[in-house]
């Protein structure tokens, strides 16, 4: 294993390799930062460029892209409340309020540092679990996937603080949106109401663009002003303070990275769930925060950012071990491997360990490289918050709509983005959390598929969810997470009553 | 048990969601058991939650209890903590109209002509910028969109329904 690691370092040692990595990182940062593009598009678009390359060169280029996209996405999440890619959505909850308070530089510093450290931890975890990869993923069967999805949604609803009821409602509505369209288990088209646009279901990327990017532009247009509420007092320094915050809150970063690695390794669940779960866990671990979550708490930036970068290492675990991609991005990356004659599985792990470790080194160096670029340019990026809304609204709206169209080149996706923009706006207006809605859309199909698979395994007996150790543990965690706010309130009341009695 | 005037827009919002959920449940019954089983479970789970959300808006003991159970706040405290941004219906309708015209424009004449026109008009008529500033930003935006999407990424941007008709 040590020899393979050394070979990976040597592969990356030449100027040509470093240039490839730098190019991949810059493309990843740009695609991550522009809403609607994302790493999957970047990896897919770069595939033709790798035709003439050696496999390890292609791996370096793709590693650079994959490690940098979520770091790039955090910049637009913080400055514009528009997640560059879906996993950055959780960063908007506290990153954007920080930008509104004039602390954009600090938020970007913390996000970039947490991203780099999370990325490195994810990759180290990948190296650590290579020998035991198979056993880990095989622990998850359909009942466990189902329970994990339910736990994810409930935990996120709970994390919406005093809006638990609204969080649960939006989670359910999100699930319903996920049911629209073709259901491949029974080959049936459901809830399309005869509209051809809905036959293939609601596509996630245009929906997210509408829900986060355009709805925010509508909200800004209705409210007026600039992104930073106090334009005269926008803090564009403080990047180093953000870096320090990550080291000060090292446990938040470690827990987030742990979530990212673990969730990333579960096929199909991916970085979005990791980031949201990491965020909600952080909010629960910190019941009496100095600054409320959702109102500019720096830990609310560190937790999701460390998770969504750590997931890169985690999602490669099933991809490399079984050829089961952990995310859309790794699915396209799998195509690159196959294109270059590399078959994932035990053979890859035994015969081509040098390639595995080239990827490991590329991901590590790129995570740090992308962070250095963001840290160096953060001051200039923070200036974006001073722009008048009347310059931002038309440009962001148009670019977001083009992004919604570009992924599938379908005009229907523009209509979907437009409809979700209004749904998003009304959710802002009536204070319904968009986060649970989003996560439920993401998890909708996996949840139903896992449910049906579980029913098939158990001959329609629901008991399958309550008789398996891991599934039961996840169910217990779900119940505990739902009971947590009541428990916390009772404890608070008891404490207050005790204090009153003492006085 | 009545809903105070200032909470009525929220109540209307909940009623719209409730109507959608009922439509969803009714539609579910059109499908086979396997297809409708999970959607129905989800739909029926939504109903009591929405009713509780509606009850929490009322001036009543039950409303207070629901609100305290789910948010640890009385409805009065929820009102105090609510977003106080003044949003006029006229302003909202105006913005919806601008966005609607943009999407309709993209559908009819495509991205490339629509982008500079929309950016220019917004800057000039909503932002109050000068003709020159508005023109600069609109040209900058269309150049960015064209270079990134058409040239670098080689996407064929939607040309509009009219150009489709004329091949």
Image (cartoon, rainbow, N blue to C red):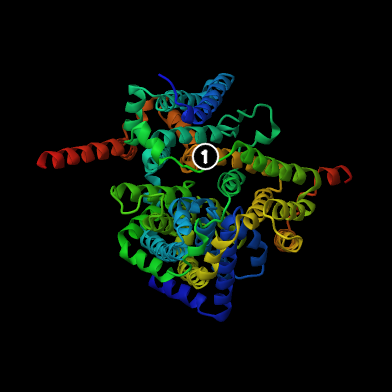
- Observer-nearest of A137 and A38: A38
The answer to which quarter of the image holds residue B104 is top right
Picture quadrant where residue A133 is located: bottom left
Q: Tell me residue B40's x, y (percent).
A: 49, 24
Pick the front one: B108 or A461: B108
Can you name the residue that lies furthest to the left here? A502
Chain under disc 1: A
- Do we see residue A163 in this rendering? no
Q: Residue A142 location in percent, x, y?
A: 43, 37
Residue under label 1, please give it: A429
Q: Quadrant of the N terminus of chain B?
A: top left
Name the residue at 34% across, 48% down.
Answer: A283
Q: Quadrant of residue A113?
A: bottom left
Where does residue A99 sit, x and y in percent of width and height?
48, 59
B119 or A201: nearer the viewer: B119
Give the residue displayed 57% in from the left and 38% down from the top. Answer: A423
The number of numbered discs placed on residues in the rendered structure image is 1
In the image, residue A404 lies at what x, y percent?
65, 49
A470 relative to B142, above or below: above
Mark 1 nearby-residue class (10 Å; few <14, some 14–19, many ≥20): some
Q: Secondary structure at mark 1?
A: helix
Name the one closer to the observer, A3 or B71: B71
Task: Report whether residue B77 is seen.
Answer: yes
């Amino acid at each position: 294993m040590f020899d393979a690691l050394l070979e990976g370092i040597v592969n990356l040692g030449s100027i040509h390799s470093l240039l490839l990595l730098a190019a991949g990182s810059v493309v990843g940062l740009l695609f991550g930062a522009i809403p609607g593009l994302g790493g999957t598009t970047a990896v897919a678009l770069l595939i033709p460029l790798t035709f003439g390359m050696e496999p390890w060169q292609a791996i370096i280029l793709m590693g650079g892209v994959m490690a940098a996209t979520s770091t790039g996405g955090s910049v637009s999440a913080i400055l514009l409340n528009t997640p560059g890619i879906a996993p950055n959505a959780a960063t908007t909850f506290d990153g954007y309020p920080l930008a509104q308070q004039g602390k954009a530089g600090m938020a970007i510093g913390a996000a970039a540092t947490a991203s780099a450290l999370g990325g490195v931890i994810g990759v180290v975890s990948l190296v650590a679990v290579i020998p035991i990869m198979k056993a880990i993923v095989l622990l998850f069967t359909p009942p466990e996937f189902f329970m994990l999805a339910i736990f994810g949604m409930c935990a996120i609803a709970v994390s919406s603080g005093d809006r638990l009821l609204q969080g649960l409602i939006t989670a359910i509505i999100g699930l319903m949106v996920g049911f629209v369209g073709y259901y491949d288990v029974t080959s049936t088209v459901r809830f399309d109401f005869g509209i051809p646009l809905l036959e293939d279901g609601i596509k996630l990327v245009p929906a997210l663009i509408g829900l986060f990017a355009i709805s925010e532009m509508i909200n800004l247009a209705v409210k007026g002003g600039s992104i930073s509420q106090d334009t005269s007092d926008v803090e564009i320094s403080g990047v180093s303070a953000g870096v320090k915050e990550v080291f000060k809150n090292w446990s938040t970063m470690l827990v987030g990275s742990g979530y990212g690695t673990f969730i990333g390794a579960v096929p199909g669940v991916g970085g979005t769930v990791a980031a949201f779960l990491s965020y909600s866990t952080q909010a629960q671990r910190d019941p009496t925060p100095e600054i409320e979550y959702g109102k500019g708490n720096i830990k609310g930036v560190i937790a999701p950012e460390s998770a969504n970068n750590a997931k890169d290492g985690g999602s490669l675990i099933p991809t490399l071990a079984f050829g089961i991609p952990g995310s859309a991005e790794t699915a396209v990356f799998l195509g690159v491997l196959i294109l270059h004659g590399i078959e994932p599985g035990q053979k890859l792990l035994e015969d081509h360990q040098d390639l595995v470790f080239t990827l490991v080194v590329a991901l590590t160096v790129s995570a740090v490289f992308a962070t250095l670029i963001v840290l160096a340019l953060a001051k200039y990026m923070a200036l974006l918050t001073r722009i008048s809304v009347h310059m931002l609204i038309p440009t962001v709206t148009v670019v977001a709509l083009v992004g919604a169209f570009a992924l599938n080149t379908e005009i229907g996706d523009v209509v979907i983005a437009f409809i979700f923009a209004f749904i998003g706006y009304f959710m802002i207006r009536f204070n319904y959390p968009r986060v649970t809605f989003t996560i439920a859309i993401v998890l909708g199909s996996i949840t139903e598929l896992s449910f049906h698979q579980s029913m098939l395994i158990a001959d329609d007996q629901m008991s399958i969810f309550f008789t398996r150790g891991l599934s039961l543990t996840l169910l217990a965690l779900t119940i505990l997470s739902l009971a947590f706010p009541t428990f916390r309130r009772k404890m608070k009341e008891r404490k207050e009553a005790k204090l009153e009695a003492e006085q | 048990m009545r809903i105070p005037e200032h909470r009525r827009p929220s109540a209307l919002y909940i009623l719209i969601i409730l109507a959608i959920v009922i439509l969803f449940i009714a539609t579910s019954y059109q499908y086979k058991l396997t297809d409708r089983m999970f959607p129905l479970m989800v739909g029926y789970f939504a109903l009591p939650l929405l009713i509780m959300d509606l009850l929490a808006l009322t001036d009543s003991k039950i409303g207070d209890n629901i609100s305290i159970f789910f948010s640890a706040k009385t409805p009065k405290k929820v009102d105090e903590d609510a977003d106080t941004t003044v949003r006029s219906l006229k302003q909202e309708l105006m913005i919806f109209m601008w966005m609607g015209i943009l999407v309709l424009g993209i559908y009819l004449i495509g991205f490339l002509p629509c982008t500079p026109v929309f950016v220019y008009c917004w800057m000039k008529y909503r932002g109050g910028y000068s003709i020159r500033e508005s023109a600069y930003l609109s040209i900058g935006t269309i150049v960015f969109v064209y270079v990134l999407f058409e040239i670098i990424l080689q996407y064929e941007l939607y040309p509009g329904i009219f150009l489709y008709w004329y091949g």
